[in-house]
Amino acid sequence: MIDVKGKWTLITGGCRGVGRLTAIEMAKLGANIILQGRDKAHAEPVIAELKKYGVEVRAVGCNLESEAEIDAALAEIDSWGVQVDLVFNNAGLMSHYFTDYLTNTMDDFHHAMAVNFFAPVKIAYHFLPSMIERGFGRMQLTTSGIANEPELMGYACAKAALTKFVKDFACKLNGTDVMMNVMDPGWLRTDLGGPNAPNAPETVIPGSMVSVLLDDKKSGRWFSAQEFTGMTLADAVEKGKKVEA
């Protein structure tokens, strides 16, 4: 398991849900945290919470549907002169539920793809070159196991595209200390998952962190967070070593 103490960690969607829970656990390990939220003000309570662990915490605000706002947020991070070593591309947007699945609109596809695919891919391309240049980095993109639900086709297709991006990129990263994998949190009772989901948000821990903490130089893998629920972090990382692409 890598030592993340003092390493700057960007967590998109870090002000609530899975992002917030992951930020807390990473701060406990000593990682410095950069939170991204739609509104920077939403990060203030989480910043105060994280600083209790003696780490540095900063935040950027941007609408992930806006390429210009993403560019501005990335430029702001660059201006701080910090080295971002770990990235959790966690933010997501659930598409509209079309009871009549034949009425899915292209507008819904555009919204879903913007947040769930284009934004994390843009962020990945921003940080990967410097990670590769210095020979170290971790990138985790959040996918979904959603299947056979054409009522949510925009969301499902965006997550499938994101998984394909990571799996095909693996051939360029395998064997290096720059690792990029996907993590499926499971269906959670969050703002995105809704109140009828079977799993409490807390069940995503420690699984939401495993791919970033591994040190086995393997990319393109799918980590299901629910398979690690209830485990110690050390045991979860050991189990994670057995996950293959």
Image: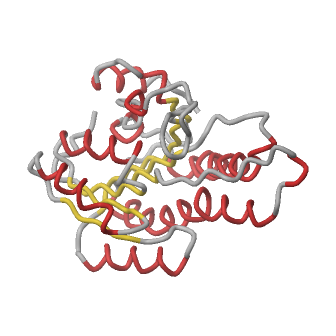
Q: Residue, x 86% and y 46% (percent of image)?
A: 101
In this view, 42 is above or below 144: below
Say how the picture is coloured.
secondary structure
Location of residue 57 (image quadrant): bottom left
Say which quadrant the N terminus sits in: top left
Q: Position of residue 88 (x, y in %)?
A: 41, 51
Horizontal relation, residue 211 to residue 194: left or right: left
Horizontal relation, residue 123 to residue 187: left or right: left
Q: Position of residue 110 (x, y in %)?
A: 71, 65
Between 184 and 210, the residue placed more toward the observer is: 184
Q: Residue, x 38% and y 60% (percent of image)?
A: 131
Residue occupying the far right of the picture = 102
Q: Position of residue 214 (x, y in %)?
A: 36, 35
Number of residue marks: 0
Horizontal relation, residue 238 to residue 29: left or right: right
Between 170 and 104, the residue placed more toward the observer is: 104
Q: Where is residue 213 in the image (x, y as percent from the top left)?
A: 33, 38
Q: Residue, x 82% and y 61% (percent of image)?
A: 105
Say which quadrant the C terminus sits in: top right
